Image (cartoon, helix red, strand yellow):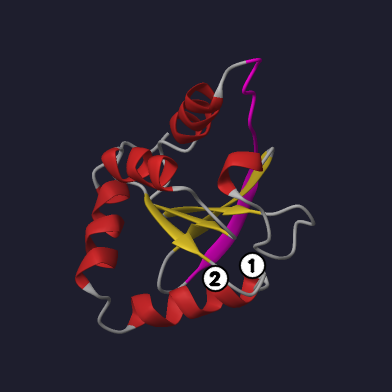
Amino acid sequence: MKVAFASTDKVHINEHFGKAKEFYLWEIGPDAAEFTGILQVDEGDGDADDRIEARSAALADCALVYVSQIGGPAAARLVAKKIHPLKSKTAEPITEVVARLQEVLQGSPPPWLRKAMMKNAGAAKG
């Protein structure tokens, strides 16, 4: 499944969703995980709603988005697009979160994560 991480240093989850200029993208499965690229956000000169929409639209292919902080309206917009936002309270290293996520996927993922995994299962590859 595709997972995005908001980061200012490419290493830690340490950026607020509404301020993130870049998201680091990973493809994560139970047996393999790979960094797949950087998503640059172009928000133009819009207001807060426009900035939220620009980010949520850019992340449309992702099942999960890890951030340091996210406001209620932004979280609701992501959930409406079937993207699950997750907050990292301690600026965790992205690679540690990826490894933990893989461990969960190898076992019995909780219902919310199984649902998130299904988002990408139906998506066309290409």
Q: Are marks 1 and 2 in contact (CB under 8 Å)?
A: yes
Point 44% across, 29% down: residue: 57
Residue identified by numbered label 1: 94
Residue toward you, 83 or 51: 51
Task: Tell me which amino acid carries mark 2.
Answer: Val
The quadrant in which the C terminus is found is: top left
Q: Is residue 35 magenta?
A: yes
Rendered image: mark on residue 98: 2
Residue toward you, 99 or 8: 8
Q: How many marks?
A: 2
Residue toward you, 46 or 27: 46
Magenta segment: 32-45
* Residue 35, x across and y down, in percent: 62, 56
Task: Tell me which amino acid carries mark 1.
Answer: Ile
Kindly state the secondary structure of the residue where label 1 is placed: helix
Kindly indicate the quadrant of the structure image that contains residue 18: top right
What is the spatial separation of the Cα atoms under label 1 and label 2, in whole angstroms?
6 Å
Going by the image, does 95 lie left or right of 84? right
Point 62% across, 23% down: residue: 43
Kindly indicate the quadrant of the structure image that contains residue 97: bottom right
Going by the image, does 80 lie left or right of 5? left
Point 31% across, 36% down: residue: 124
Residue toward you, 45 or 39: 45
Task: Name above or below for residue 66 compared with residue 44.
Answer: below
Kindly state the secondary structure of the residue where label 2 is placed: helix
* Residue 7, x across and y down, in percent: 69, 54
Point 43% across, 41% down: residue: 74
Going by the image, does 19 lie left or right of 49? right
Task: Name above or below for residue 23 compared with residue 115.
Answer: above
* Residue 116, x across and y down, in percent: 29, 56
